[in-house]
Image (tube, rainbow, N blue to C red):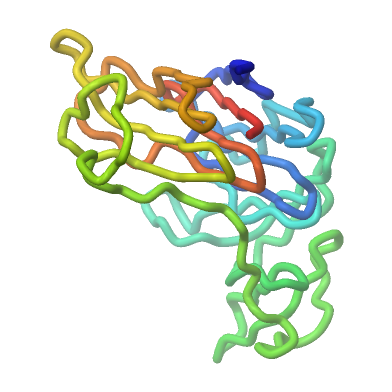
Amino acid sequence: MTQLLPFISKQFNGIIWRMEIDEIGDTIYLEVRKTEDKLVSFAAVDLLSGQTNFEDITLPERWLAGIEAAYNNILLLHGYQGQNAPVHRGLTALAEDGSVLWSNYSIVFDHLSINGPVTYATQIQPRKLFLTDVGTGANIRQFDSLSDSEYINNIVFPQSVNDSELNFKLPVKSYDNVVDYLTYNNYRVVSLHTLNGEQLVQVMYVWDGEVLVYQDILNDNIQKMQPEAFILCKNRIIYIKNKTGLKVISL
């Protein structure tokens, strides 16, 4: 049985704070933060080729920005109303190469529809929603809840189950008897917390049928339990390693 190897294995110079997947463009976007420098940057990796489309892209506002959404090979970034206000404000769109397509600081992202982003202008009351052209930032027309139904992605998250519910033996003992579990075709994927000596670590295993074909330490030297460790998008397992590394394996 052939062992799986990461299709994408990329290290970033900062903590991966958020990732967003554009299923239309088969691209994963990452928000990378360096708290010591108060600097946020953005990166994009092609999930088909494994190539990096761009990285280390920053905005004039070095810290108060973040990923809002991604649609059709365009990344939407938001700003904030203020340093101590978590409310989002404004949008900036990045092209496939990381260049700025447009910016509008007077609109706010509401949600993503099957036809693109839906936004509203902060100065107009009561609030009016518009379908917005993701490539130009111009309003196409007023939002129609029937025509512009919410975009639903196909990302699958593992389920948390008690390890006693599994019908196979784990290589290590779960620290709290809970594992994150997912199946895809003939593959079974499990992540769990376990003790390595006195140190708590988070690990992941992949079986093809009855054969263990992949394993990795996702987080070591951790002080508390971490949330679910991986997602499935199409046939790809995507996870963050030690907060700074992106890894993707194809099943």
The N terminus lies in which quarter of the figure? top right
Tell me if residue 38 can be seen: no
- The residue furthest top is 197
Quadrant in which residue 58 is drawn = top right
Tell me if residue 51 can be seen: yes
| Camera-side residue of 202 and 72 | 202
Quadrant in which residue 125 is drawn = bottom right
| Camera-side residue of 112 and 63 | 112
Tell me which residue sits at (81%, 30%) in the image: 49
Where residue 217 appears, x then y in whole percent? 40, 18
Q: Is residue 223 above or below residue 186?
A: above
Where residue 132 appears, x then y in whole percent? 77, 72
Tell me which residue sits at (27%, 15%) in the image: 221
| Camera-side residue of 81 and 50 | 50
Where residue 209 appears, x then y in whole percent? 51, 32
Q: Is residue 108 above or below residue 164?
A: below
Would residue 110 be found to the left or right of residue 43 on screen? left
The count of marks equals: 0
Tell me which residue sits at (27%, 48%) in the image: 161
Tell me which residue sits at (58%, 71%) in the image: 110
Where residue 249 appears, x then y in whole percent? 61, 28
Would residue 98 be found to the left or right of residue 234 on screen? right
The C terminus lies in which quarter of the figure? top right
